[in-house]
Image (cartoon, grey):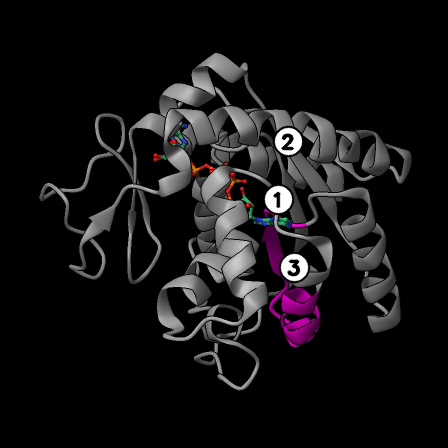
Amino acid sequence: MPSQAKPNRAAWLEGSSNVCAPQPGPTHPWRLILLGAPGVGKGTQADLLSQRLGACHLSTGDVLRNAGQSVSEPTPAMTAARDCMQRGALVPDHTVWEIVRERSACIRCRGGFILDGFPRTRLQAELLNQLIADEGISLDAVVNYEMPIAKIVERLSGRRICKACKAVYHVTRQPSKTDGVCDTCGENLFHREDDRPEAVTVRMETYERSTAPLIEFYRDFGLLLPVAAAGSPEEICARTMEALQNRKS
Ligand code: AP5
C-alpha cells in the first residue's frame, strides 16, 4: 500500500477548536486501537501506520504531555495528572475521559483513527464502546503488540522525543541524524521523566494490573489482533499491515 500524507493532528493535540490541515479522504477509514506494554513501540507503529493508512495517530499520552508543557497556570486536574505521569501511575479515568470526549470529532473523523494509549482501563474501554456506538461507527481491530518486558525496558531507557512534533527516536536503534535534534522539524529532543527506572517499574506494574485485562475484553468482542513486536519498526509495521489486510479480506 503506498504511503499517504500524515495527518497533522492539530485538533487532537491542541483541542477541538483547532482545525486539522485537510487530507485526501482514504478509501477505507481505518479505526484501530493499539494495545501493548509501555515502550513496546505503539507510538512508533502508530506513526508508521498513520503514513500507510492515512488515519490520525491519537495518543492520550501526547495530549497530556502537551497540556503539561503549554499551560502556564495548570488546573488542579492537570497538576494531579502531571504528578501521576511522573510517578508512572495512570491519570484518573475522569480526567482522561474529559480529554477524549472533548475531542470526539477526532473519533468520528472520516479519515479514521489509530488510538495509542487509550483505552487503558476497563472503564475507559466501556466509555469508548459507548461513544463509538453513539457515533454509529465500528472498530476494525485492536492490535496487541507482544514482547518480553526485559526487552521493552531497554527500549525505554534510550528513548528520546521531539518537543514540538512528538517524533520518537532511540539513542542507538533509531538515532536522529544530529544528536539531540529532530530530523523532521529541527526542535530539541528530550528524555521523558517517566522513562526513569523507578517510574518504568510502576508503569509496568500498572500495565499488568489495569491494561492487560483489556486483551481478554477485546478478544471477547472478536477484535483482537496479536502482533509480535520483535524486529525493526518497518518489519513490525509490515507484519501489522499484513495482519490487517488478512482480517479485512
Ligand atoms: P503514553 O505516552 O501512552 O506512554 P506508554 O503507553 O507508557 O507508552 P510509551 O509511549 O512509553 O511507549 P510506546 O509503546 O508508544 O513505545 P515507543 O514507540 O515510544 O502514556 C504516558 C503516561 O500518560 C501514562 O503512564 C499515564 O500516566 C498517562 N496516560 C496516558 N494515557 C492514559 C490513559 N488512557 N489513562 C490513564 N493515564 C494515561 O517506543 C519506545 C522506544 O523504543 C523508542 O525509543 C523507540 O524509538 C524504540 N523502538 C520502537 N520500536 C522499536 C523497534 N522495533 N526496535 C528498536 N527500538 C524500537
Q: Residues within 10 Å of mark 2 (few under 14, many from 20)?
A: some
Question: Is there any visible trace of residue 29 in the rendered image?
Answer: no
Q: Is mark 3 within 8 Å of ligand 1?
A: yes
Residue beneath disc 1: 90
Q: Residues within 10 Å of mark 3 (few under 14, many from 20)?
A: many
Q: Residue at x 43, y 41 (%)?
A: 44
Relative to 205, is 155 on the left or the right?
Answer: left
Residue beneath disc 2: 206
Residue beneath disc 3: 96
Quarter in which the C terminus is drawn? top right
Label 1–label 2 contact, CB within 8 A: yes
Marks 2 and 3 sit apart, C-alpha to C-alpha, by 16 Å
Mark earlier in primary sequence (1, 2): 1
Boundaries of the magenta span: 98-118
Q: Residue at x 53, y 86 (%)?
A: 17
Q: Is mark 2 within 8 Å of ligand 1?
A: yes
Where residue 105 appears, x then y in whole percent?
A: 66, 76
Marks 1 and 2 sit apart, C-alpha to C-alpha, by 7 Å
Relative to 71, is 24 on the left or the right?
Answer: right
